[in-house]
């Protein structure tokens, strides 16, 4: 286009922009020998661009789930920074959980970025059961000892000696009576 001096010319410029969003895939892996015995697991997914939140989602995984659970979020602007946190691990009594959280990712145009959270569950050994002790029973209340408890034994000994003496006297009298 040529513009002559002292004339007005009009130019139309067209700039075509195609929005080319990225995708975020959040994968939760439930692993370990005790997988499936855990309680409810809760994840929080947040994406921001220039300090403004563009995605804030809560993902709830039901108790007893195993394997992998995936959630996909599309239409995210290139340059969005996305992170995942776990607000409930599913740990229950008798289970130990080890959690691996990923570093945040930056969304690229027309591509999928992944955040993978892995929980490994193992059963914990409980305490060894012990026999139930017998309930405490206080001793019966007794009066202080006065020595009277021993009197019964001495009384029996005395009675035995008197009886033996009586038998001895009777035997002696009998012998005497047979000599006269």
Image (tube, grey):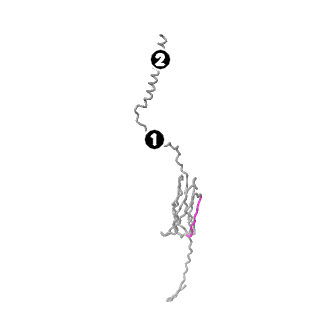
In magenta segment, residue 35: no
Q: Quadrant of residue 117?
A: bottom right
Identified at 44% across, 27% down, the residue is: 155
Q: Quadrant of residue 12?
A: bottom right
Quick one: 123 or 173, which is closer to the camera? 173
Q: Disc 1 or disc 2, which is closer to the eye?
A: 2
The residues tagged by marks 1 and 2 sit, at their Cα atoms, a distance apart of: 54 Å
Quick one: 54 or 109, which is closer to the camera? 54
Part of the protein shown in magenta: 67-75
Residue receiving disc 1: 138
Quick one: 156 or 107, which is closer to the camera? 156
Q: Residues within 10 Å of mark 2 (few under 14, many from 20)?
A: few
SS assignment for the magenta stretch, majority: strand
Identified at 48% across, 13% down, the residue is: 177
Residue receiving disc 2: 170
Identified at 43% across, 39% down, the residue is: 141
Q: Residue furthest right?
A: 67
Question: Where is residue 143 shown, x and y percent of the image?
Answer: 41, 36
| Image quarter hosting the N terminus | bottom right
In magenta segment, residue 69: yes
């Amino acid at each position: 286009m040529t513009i002559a001096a002292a004339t007005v010319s009009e130019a139309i410029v067209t700039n075509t922009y195609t929005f080319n969003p990225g995708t975020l895939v959040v994968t939760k892996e439930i692993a370990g020998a005790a997988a499936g015995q855990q309680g409810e697991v809760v994840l929080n997914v947040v994406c921001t661009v220039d300090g403004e939140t563009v995605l804030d989602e809560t993902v709830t995984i039901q108790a007893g789930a195993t394997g992998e659970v995936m959630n996909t979020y599309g239409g995210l602007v290139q340059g969005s920074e996305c992170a995942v946190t776990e607000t409930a691990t599913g740990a229950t009594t008798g289970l130990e959980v080890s959690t691996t959280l990923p570093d945040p990712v930056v969304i690229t145009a027309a591509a999928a970025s992944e955040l993978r959270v892995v929980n490994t569950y193992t059963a914990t050994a409980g305490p060894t059961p012990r026999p139930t002790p017998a309930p405490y029973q206080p001793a019966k209340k007794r009066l202080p000892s006065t020595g009277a408890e021993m009197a019964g034994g001495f009384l029996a000994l005395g009675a035995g000696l008197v009886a033996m003496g009586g038998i001895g006297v009777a035997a002696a009298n009998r012998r005497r009576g047979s000599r006269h």
